Image (cartoon, rainbow, N blue to C red):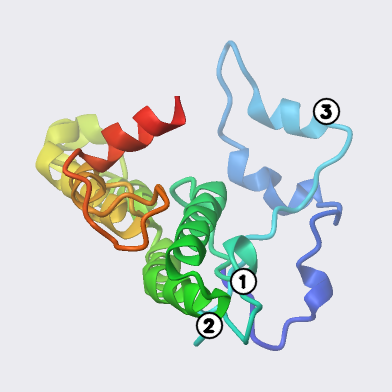
Amino acid sequence: KRMPADMHWAREDWNRAGRIEDFLPDFAGWEWSWLSVPSLIRATEAVWEFPMVDRDPLPNWTRGRVTLLGDAAHPMYPIGSNGASQGILDARTLAYHLAMEGDAAAGLRAYEAARRPATSALVEASRNQGPDLVLDLADQRAPEGFAAVGGREAVLPLAELEEISRAYKRKAGFDPALLNARESLSYTGATAKAPDPRPAARRDFHRSR
């Protein structure tokens, strides 16, 4: 859940101890002959809170010769494994534009222009659960399980699952078609941005070997 605007900053503490009684009731029925989840929870020595927080997209990242990247620029919910991957994309894009532009200020502006709209859209998509949306859809459409309503395909057709996945990959920059169509972020020393005819994924791998 998003934190209220007036919530004290101390609430977002990664070292705050949690209380078992706050979440144990949610697992009361998780009992099987081979596993008792409530017993495991009660037997644990300590639990810690995991703050699920983000920030509204910023109107700009760059001031003069200083800019932001990674979580400093676009903290988002941990949906779709984007914590590290978006920071890596930021760093690669930043290095490329600094090298291509030659002038630091121009390079920072080009980097922000390339990355800020994309990550802002991803922050919003993560708030809507991204690919994890399928969990809510399954719960809404089959609260008693897939078998009760004709199986998984009747609840979540494969075509729908694939489109949810593709839509999120497009926003996250992981879509194979987009990767192969875009200009490579490998700097070769040329000042002109001439396109490389080879697919991006293949040529980047070749240069990194």
Q: CA distance from mark 2 to mark 3?
A: 43 Å
Mark 2 sits on what residue?
58
Give the vertical position of 127 relative to 44 (above or below).
below
| Residue at image location 65% in from the left, 28% down from the top | 37
Determine the secondary structure under disc 1. Answer: loop
Question: Percent x, y for residue 172?
Answer: 36, 55
* Mark 1–mark 2 CB contact (< 8 Å): yes
* Quarter in which the N terminus is drawn: bottom right
Q: Residues within 10 Å of mark 3 (few under 14, many from 20)?
A: few
Callout in the foreground (2, 3): 2
Mark 1 sits on what residue?
68
Q: CA distance from mark 1 to mark 2?
A: 10 Å
| Residue at image location 50% in from the left, 59% down from the top | 90
As shown in the figure, which amino acid type bears the numbered disc 2?
A: Leu
Determine the secondary structure under disc 2. Answer: loop
* Mark 3–mark 1 CB contact (< 8 Å): no
**Relative horizontal placement of residue 6, taking residue 200 as reference (left or right):** right
Mark 3 sits on what residue?
43
**Is any part of residue 127 visible from this angle?**
no
Callout in the foreground (1, 2): 1
Determine the secondary structure under disc 3. Answer: helix
**Relative horizontal placement of residue 58, taking residue 173 as reference (left or right):** right
Question: Percent x, y for residue 45?
Answer: 89, 33
As shown in the figure, which amino acid type bears the numbered disc 1?
A: Leu
